[in-house]
Amino acid sequence: MLRFLATLMTLLATASVSAQTVQPSQPPEVSGDFVVNSFQFSDGTTLPQIKLHYVTLGTPHRDSHGRVTNAVLLLHGTTGTGKAFLAAPMRRELFAPGQPLDASRYYIILPDGLGRGGSSKPSDGLRARFPHYGYNDVVAAQYQLVTQGLGVNHLRLVLGTSMGGMQTWIWGERYPDMMDGLMPIASQPIPMAGRNWFWRQMIVSAIRTDPDWHNGDYAQQPGQWVRTMPIFTLITQNPARMQLAAQTREAATQLYDSTVADARQFDANDVLYWFESSWDYNPEPELGRIKAKLYAVNFADDLINAADLKVMQRIMPTLHDGRYVEIPETDRSYGHQTLAHPEVWKPYLIDLLSSLPAQ
């Protein structure tokens, strides 16, 4: 049974604050929290403190000038946390010995984005009084974590999936001298509009009009909006995969009911902010600022980043050093969720890393 939202809940679990050994063959996994004082949001709001949770693998290396040479920043999707990259397929295909991001060679940084996981978020107490952050605020907070919290002054690579891919574009143009390579996966560098905002608005409006929401000051979690949340599964999954998972009407009904049940475990204010936080996303006008080599990877069967819009074919020529790969639909496809299957897109990561300038 395909229980996608249940998997997402697992990814949202908060990491332990103590160091722990992942596998005998891999360096220690270390998690912690970095506190930023007087963080100013792009809407002019300031919070006295925000907390940014993170996990790291490996050890930073520095050259004779003190420049970090092996740091990699990995950015997760809308409903996930940094732990999305600690799932078994990611560890096996990316971080294991001999793999492209071998944790014995690289210093891998996995932050929880602002508003999610162990980082500051509405459900910590402010609820709807939490500042309405945008993607640029999330990236600004990530930058402070990387540079001030972890002391990293250079990144070998920034790689992100889905929302993390969108934030990878922002990283490239806001901090053009910070990294050697960029790999946005399952994203497009254009504002939210059309079908991509249409389905998100279904969730946003369902929360705001839920009679139990009370402008975010609910005594108990609102319950009606969760019946809309399965649109997330519908828009992110490959239809052939869903057909295999639910081959009868009864099975499809059970799948729907299970995703509704899983959605009840989310906090409504957090979810509302997740889907509204793309309000400030529009990297297209500043793409010319990107200096790093960029490989953009999308999937032909991804409904969120529809290939038939030809966005990437129009935009890629404006980049200084960019390449676009559109992976066709095959029996290895999972729609938008192909991003969680690094065995599919790993060859392009290997190509990108091999093409970066020597350290």
Image: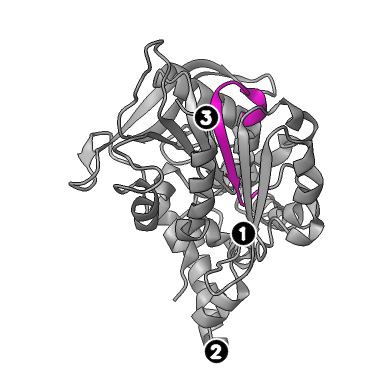
As helix, strand or loop, the secondary structure at mark 1 comes to: helix
Where is residue 203 drawn, in percent x and y? 66, 55
Residue 351 horizontal/vertical position (percent) = 52, 46
The front one of 282 and 108 is: 108
Write the residue at 38% across / 54% down. 93
Disc nearest the viewer among 3 and 2: 3
Q: Nearer the viewer, residue 241 or 333?
A: 333
Residues at marks 2 and 1, CA–CA distance in whole angstroms: 26 Å
Would you name the residue on which mark 1 appears? 225
- Residue to which mark 3 is pinned: 357
Measured as percent of width and height from the top left, residue 29 is found at: 28, 38
Residue at image location 72% in from the left, 38% down from the top: 279
- In magenta, the rendered stretch is 172-187
Mark 3 and mark 2 lie on one chain; the one further toward the N terminus is 2
Q: Quadrant of the N terminus?
A: bottom left
Q: Please say if 302 is above or below 57.
A: below
Q: What residue type is labelled 2?
A: Thr
Alpha carbons under labels 1 and 3: distance apart? 49 Å
Q: Is mark 3 on a helix, strand or loop?
A: loop
Q: In the orientation shown, which residue stands out farthest toward the top?
A: 65
Q: Residue 191's image quarter?
A: top right
**Left or right: residue 186 compared with residue 31:** right
Residue 248: give its label.
2
What is the C-alpha distance between the residues marked 3 and 2?
A: 53 Å
* Towards the viewer: 137 or 28: 28
Q: In this view, does 307 lie to the left or right of 93?
A: right
Do callouts 2 and 1 mark residues in contact (Cβ within 8 Å)? Answer: no
